[in-house]
Amino acid sequence: MATPTLEKTADTSAASPYITVTFRIRRFNPEVSDEAQWQDFQVEIDPKERVLDGLHKIKWDLDGSLTFRRSCAHGICGSDAMRINGKNRLACKTLIKDINPGKPITIEPIKGMTVLKDLVVDMEPFFQAYRDVMPFLITSGNEPTRERYQSAEDRERFDDTTKCILCAACTSSCPVFWNDGQYFGPAAIVNAHRFIFDSRDEAGEQRLEILNDKDGVWRCRTTFNCTDACPRGIEVTKAIQEVKRALITRRY
């Protein structure tokens, strides 16, 4: 494809912070072709801006057909996870200057999921695995008349896994998930962990049995890809190992 170029409209003096960056994006439109192809875009951008800012410039000024997800643009919603220079990242948290802008920045959809168009993948199987682990507090008895108290120590036990934003960066970085989409995947296990180790919850055994399935926690091969990919810094591999240990010892 031809390389569209976006000229800067900001200060053009020698002191201008803008540089020319090549965004090399993997494009796919099922209405046009069954094959994906790479397309280059030349963008004038401040290296302190984010990859998401570059994608906005392309979509708004060069090619309105470019398709990607984003919502809050502040690393909270997790909707703009994509592969940037071969690694799963959030486009809204990745600065241009941090990924060698002197070379083309490659951007493609996260792996292991069906690509719908350009950088947008079908997230439904991912969310179904999340729903399957019952990611909500389950208790018995009457509705409480006051909040359920919990000690700081009990809360700390699962604090790390409460940080998940369901971006799928961990799950789509997993080689097991790439080869077999039936695997629950790291994100589902992380969200099960959050409730298995919650002292107020009463469905830990049920969740453990769900993850004891052939497509469950035992499929993990401890490659640490998931931990490296997590934009929230969750120790994903550690959480998976803790769930495995709980299955063996039935102590949690």
Image (spheres, rainbow, N blue to C red):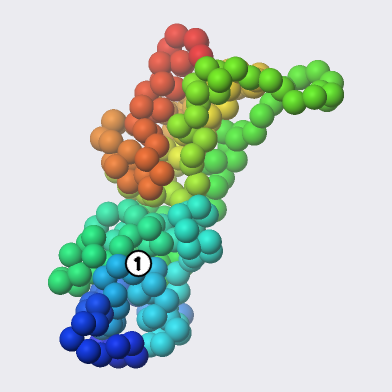
Helix, strand or loop at label 1? It is loop
Query: In percent of the image, x 28 and y 31: which residue is there?
Result: 222
Of residues 222 and 105, the one nearer the viewer is 105
Q: Position of residue 191 (x, y in %)?
A: 52, 35
Closest to the observer: 199 or 69? 199
Residue 106: quadrant of the picture: bottom left
How many numbered circles are shown? 1
Q: Is residue 198 left or right of residue 174?
A: right
Q: Residue at x 55, y 47 (%)?
A: 127
- Relative horizontal placement of residue 191, taking residue 240 as reference (left or right): right
For the N terminus, the quadrant is bottom left
Q: Quadrant of residue 236?
A: top left
Q: Judge whether residue 2 can be spotted in this image.
A: no
Residue hosting label 1 = 50
Front residue of 7 and 60:
7
Place of residue 42 in the rendered image (x, y in percent of width and height, measured from the top left): 26, 83
Q: Nearer the viewer, residue 110 or 80?
A: 80
Q: Residue at x 39, y 68 (%)?
A: 52
Would you call the spot at circle 1 few (<14 residues within 10 Å), some (14-19), or many (20 or more)? many
